[in-house]
Each structure stands twice: as structure tokens, then as C-alpha cells.
Image (cartoon, grey):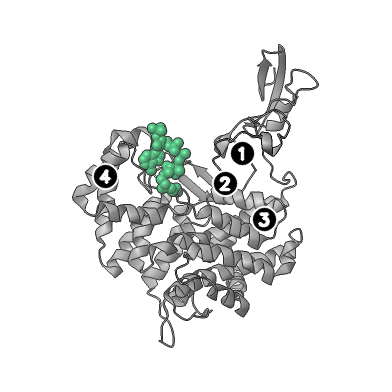
């Protein structure tokens, strides 16, 4: 008997089916043969929010949520954070291997060649209201790059893809910094290609009248580490959007903007901003207990806690906690850190959180650290979007090159009316409408 199959018996018809395993999964299309008769569509799977559905094969990122493991191309994220720069990791994610010294030099040059924005894009940014949310500006401006580089729509051409990938990685820090300067009413600072990726970003954010911006090396390295930790996270909500939009062969600027829009939600990349609001609401360490009780009573969630995949400590949170310590050595302590540490301590001892396997996630400490570095909370999701652009692009490229991928198009289980006839206006009864 073949053991590499799952045997299904359809009790409606008595028919038995052997469905082969494919890399530990069952192909959903194999279920279609299970029918009650020729008119029957066949069996589908029903999986709202993709809780148990693999949408692709991917060789980029591995996560074991139960064990708290995160690896890029096989390398533990802890080792990458300790030994590599963000651009090295970007090269790894996109190309599958770490670069040699020469390859890295060429790669860094290739990215820095693309850090400038077209002047019309700068003018485009100027059109936003003074109080526009930086994430809204970021998403719109990334989408607007599609109009600056119309050739980007030729997504099946590998050379054109390569160029857009470099452009996007080079330009997202510039766009991010300009959204920040715009909201302060400060003049934009052009990129300085002598500086590292993170230090140049800091230069574009914070340079004032000094002739040359000097980034604090500890803070620049901490930012670089945060970029490494945020670079990819396999098939999360925004990456799924990147692949879905990219599957229609939309250009990568538009697909990246769509992915960034998904990232902006408070349940995804917006969570670290929410963490700070929560810490502000708690206010003092002695009020942590009462806050945890209110969460347990159903009044909202503990932001920065819980994860769809990690049911153990998020490995990124551990590194961020360490990096936050380094940042506070430079910037001085932060009262919010005390509240956060107390919140973590209390929650990790509480039956409610233990039972549900709720641990701090990547967003729990990143917000406090960003704030200590001088970032305003509205910028936090933008800071996430910069490195995640690399992950989105690596996943997008993999999707384009995968011969099994087609335009993404889920099925539905229709629950609406059967066919009915339009009633003339004068005969329609008033109905309560919700939309
Ligand atoms: N605080 C309190 N309770 C939480 C919680 C949190 N942060 N996260 C999940 N729970 C509870 C849910 O209410 C649910 O309880 P129940 O079984 O009594 O109904 C249970 O834990 C399972 O949660 P569920 O919503 O099914 O988990 P999920 O995998 O769908 O959600 C998140 C994952 C990340 C969306 C969710 O944990 C969350 O909203 N966290 C806060 C936002 C956040 O930090 N997001 C950043 C993610 S990197």
C-alpha cells in the first residue's frame, strides 16, 4: 500500500480517493475530483484568513513558530543581526547567497546609485497636507514612482526587474525621510552616498545646517539591526498582498505600495505605534496590573503581544530588547521601557497569556527604541516598510519566476440570494440598508 497518500472516503457517494502528498501538503486542486455527479463543482477547501493554506513554495524565509526560529535562506536571523549589514542581508534575500567582499561593494554601489528622487517626485510630496500621516505619504509616493519609471511594467524582463528592485531599495529611505521632513515643514535633505544605508537615512531625517552629518555609530548600527530583523517574514499579510498584486503583473512600484498599505494596519505593521499609545495610556508602572486585567476582561488587546505564527517568544523581540539596551546607553533611560518590562513580566506570568501562547512580538520593544532614537510614533510603520521592501521584492521575484504561479484568485462559498428579478422602483418596499 502506498503510504505517501491520504485516503478520503466520500460518505455521500461511497467513493474512495487516494490523494498524494506534496511536500507534506495536499494539493487543493486534487480535492476537485471528489464530486457527487458530473454537475457537481467538486470539493473546495474553506480557509478564511489562510490559517492552513500554503499559497506558494518559497526558499527565502523559514519560520518555526513553536520553536521561535527565524532563518533567511537558512541563516539564523540572530547570526545575521550579529555579523552582517542590512544591505548584505538584502543581497542574501534577493540572490540566495551572502555576497563576497567584491559582490557587496558592487551591490552597495548599485543601491546608492539609486537613492535620489526625481525632482517631480519631491514636488509631488509637497502637495500633501502638513499633517498627513507619513505612511499615507509613503504609500502614495511609492505608487507614484510607477509613473516615473513606466518601463517597470515589463515585469517578465529580468533586467528590467533587476533595475526596479535596486531603485526601490535605494529610494524607500529617501521617500521615508522626506515624509518626515514634510510633516515638520523642513527642507528635504539629499542623500549622502558616502554614508551607510542606515546612516544616510539618519542624515536625510535629521541633518540641519551642519556641512556633513555625523551619525552616532551605535544608533546607526541599532537601526541597521532593526532593518535586518524586519527584512522578511515569509507569507505575512503584506507579503501576501505583494504576491497577489504582483500576480496580475502590475509593476513592482504599485505592488510595493499595495503591500505597504497592508502593512499600515494596526494588526500588522501599525502595532508598534499602538504599543506606545498603550504605554502612554497605562502611564505608570503601578497601573500595569489594572491594565492587564482590563485586557483579560475583553477591553482591547495587549498591543505588541501575540502572533499568528510564533507561539513561543518571537526571536526578533529578543534581539530588539538587546539592541534597545544599547540605544538607551546612548540616549539615556526611557520611563516607557520600565512600564514595558513590567507589562512583559506580568503578562508572561499570567494564566490568560500563557494558555493562549501570547508572547511579546517584534513590535513590543521596537517602538520604545525608535522613540528613544528620536522618531515620532507616526514614523514607526514607515521604518518597518523600508527594510520589508526587500522581503516583498524577493518574494515578488520568486513569484514571477515560479512557473506554477498564476493570477491569484481565491474561491468563495456563495451565501447570497438565488437568482431573482428586479422589482420596479414604485413597488419596492423600504428596506434597512447598512451601506
Ligand atoms: N492581547 C490579548 N489577547 C490576545 C492578544 C493580545 N495581544 N492576541 C490574541 N489574543 C487572544 C484572542 O482574543 C484570542 O482569545 P480567545 O481564544 O479567548 O478568543 C486568542 O488570544 C487567539 O487570538 P487570535 O486573534 O485568534 O490570534 P491570531 O493569530 O488571529 O492574531 C494577532 C494574531 C497578531 C493579530 C493578535 O495576536 C493581535 O492582534 N495582537 C496585537 C497586535 C499586534 O501586536 N500585532 C503585531 C503582530 S507582529
- Crowding around mark 4 (Cα neighbors within 10 Å: few <14, some 14 to 19, many 20+) is some
Mark closest to the chain's N terminus, 4 or 3: 4
- Crowding around mark 1 (Cα neighbors within 10 Å: few <14, some 14 to 19, many 20+) is few
Location of the N terminus (image quadrant)? top right
Residue sitting at x 32%, y 40%: 295
**Label 1 to label 2, Cα distance in Å?**
9 Å
**Label 1 to label 3, Cα distance in Å?**
18 Å
Residue 54 tag number: 1
| Mark toward the viewer: 2 or 4 | 4
**Label 4 to label 3, Cα distance in Å?**
44 Å
Give the labeled residue for mark 3: 397
Mark closest to the chain's N terminus, 1 or 2: 1
Circle 4 — which element?
helix
Please determine whether, in this image, residue 16 is positioned above or below residue 196. above
Left or right: 340 in relation to 175: left
Residue 291 tag number: 4
Residue sitting at x 38%, y 66%: 376
Nearer to the camera, 141 or 100? 141
- Crowding around mark 2 (Cα neighbors within 10 Å: few <14, some 14 to 19, many 20+) is some
Give x and y (percent) for residue 26: 65, 30
Give the labeled residue for mark 2: 235
Residue sitting at x 29%, y 69%: 331
Mark closest to the chain's N terminus, 2 or 4: 2
| Mark toward the viewer: 1 or 4 | 4
Left or right: 212 in relation to 7: left
Please determine whether, in this image, residue 203 is positioned above or below residue 357. below
Mark closest to the chain's N terminus, 2 or 3: 2
**Label 1 to label 4, Cα distance in Å?**
37 Å
Q: Are marks 2 and 4 in contact (CB under 8 Å)?
A: no
Amino acid at each position: 500500500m502506498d503510504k505517501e497518500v491520504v485516503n478520503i472516503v466520500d460518505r455521500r457517494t461511497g467513493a474512495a480517493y487516494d490523494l498524494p502528498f506534496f511536500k507534506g501538503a495536499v494539493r487543493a486542486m486534487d480535492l476537485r475530483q471528489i464530486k457527487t455527479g458530473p454537475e457537481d463543482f467538486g470539493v473546495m477547501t474553506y480557509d478564511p484568513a489562510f490559517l492552513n493554506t500554503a499559497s506558494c513554495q518559497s526558499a527565502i524565509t523559514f519560520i518555526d513558530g513553536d520553536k521561535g526560529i527565524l532563518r533567511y535562506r537558512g541563516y539564523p536571523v540572530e547570526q545575521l543581526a550579529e555579523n552582517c549589514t542590512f544591505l548584505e542581508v538584502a543581497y542574501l534575500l534577493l540572490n540566495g547567497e551572502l555576497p563576497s567582499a567584491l559582490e557587496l561593494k558592487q551591490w552597495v554601489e548599485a543601491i546608492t546609485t539609486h537613492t535620489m528622487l526625481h525632482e517631480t517626485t519631491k514636488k509631488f510630496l509637497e502637495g500633501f497636507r502638513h499633517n498627513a500621516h507619513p505612511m499615507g505619504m509613503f504609500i502614495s509616493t511609492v505608487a507614484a514612482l510607477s509613473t516615473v519609471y513606466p518601463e517597470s511594467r515589463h515585469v517578465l524582463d529580468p533586467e528590467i526587474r533587476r533595475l526596479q528592485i535596486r531603485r526601490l531599495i535605494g529610494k524607500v529611505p529617501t521617500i521615508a525621510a522626506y515624509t518626515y521632513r514634510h510633516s515638520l515643514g523642513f527642507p528635504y535633505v539629499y542623500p549622502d552616498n558616502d554614508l551607510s544605508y542606515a546612516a544616510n537615512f539618519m542624515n536625510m531625517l535629521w541633518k540641519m545646517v551642519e556641512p556633513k552629518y555625523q551619525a552616532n555609530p551605535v544608533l546607526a548600527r541599532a537601526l541597521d539591526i532593526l532593518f535586518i530583523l524586519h527584512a522578511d517574514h515569509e507569507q505575512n499579510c503584506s507579503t501576501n498582498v505583494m504576491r497577489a498584486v504582483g500576480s496580475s503583473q502590475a509593476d513592482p512600484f504599485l505592488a510595493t505600495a499595495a503591500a505597504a498599505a497592508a502593512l499600515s494596519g494596526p494588526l500588522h505593521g501599525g502595532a508598534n505605534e499602538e504599543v506606545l499609545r498603550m504605554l502612554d495610556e497605562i502611564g505608570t508602572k503601578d497601573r500595569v496590573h489594572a491594565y492587564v486585567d482590563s485586557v483579560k476582561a475583553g477591553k482591547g488587546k495587549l498591543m505588541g503581544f501575540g502572533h499568528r505564527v510564533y507561539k513561543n517568544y518571537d526571536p526578533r523581540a529578543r534581539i530588539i530588547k538587546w539592541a534597545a539596551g544599547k540605544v538607551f546607553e546612548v540616549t539615556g533611560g526611557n520611563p516607557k521601557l520600565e512600564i514595558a518590562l513590567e507589562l512583559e513580566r506580568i503578562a508572561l506570568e499570567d494564566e490568560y497569556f500563557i494558555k493562549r501562547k501570547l508572547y511579546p512580538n517584534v513590535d513590543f520593544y521596537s517602538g520604545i527604541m525608535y522613540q528613544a532614537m528620536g522618531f515620532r510614533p507616526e514614523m514607526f510603520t514607515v521604518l518597518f516598510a523600508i527594510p520589508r521592501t526587500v522581503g516583498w521584492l524577493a518574494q515578488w521575484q520568486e513569484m514571477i519566476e515560479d512557473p506554477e504561479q498564476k493570477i491569484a484568485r481565491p474561491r468563495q462559498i456563495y451565501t447570497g440570494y438565488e437568482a431573482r428579478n428586479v422589482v420596479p422602483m414604485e413597488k419596492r418596499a423600504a428596506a434597512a440598508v447598512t451601506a
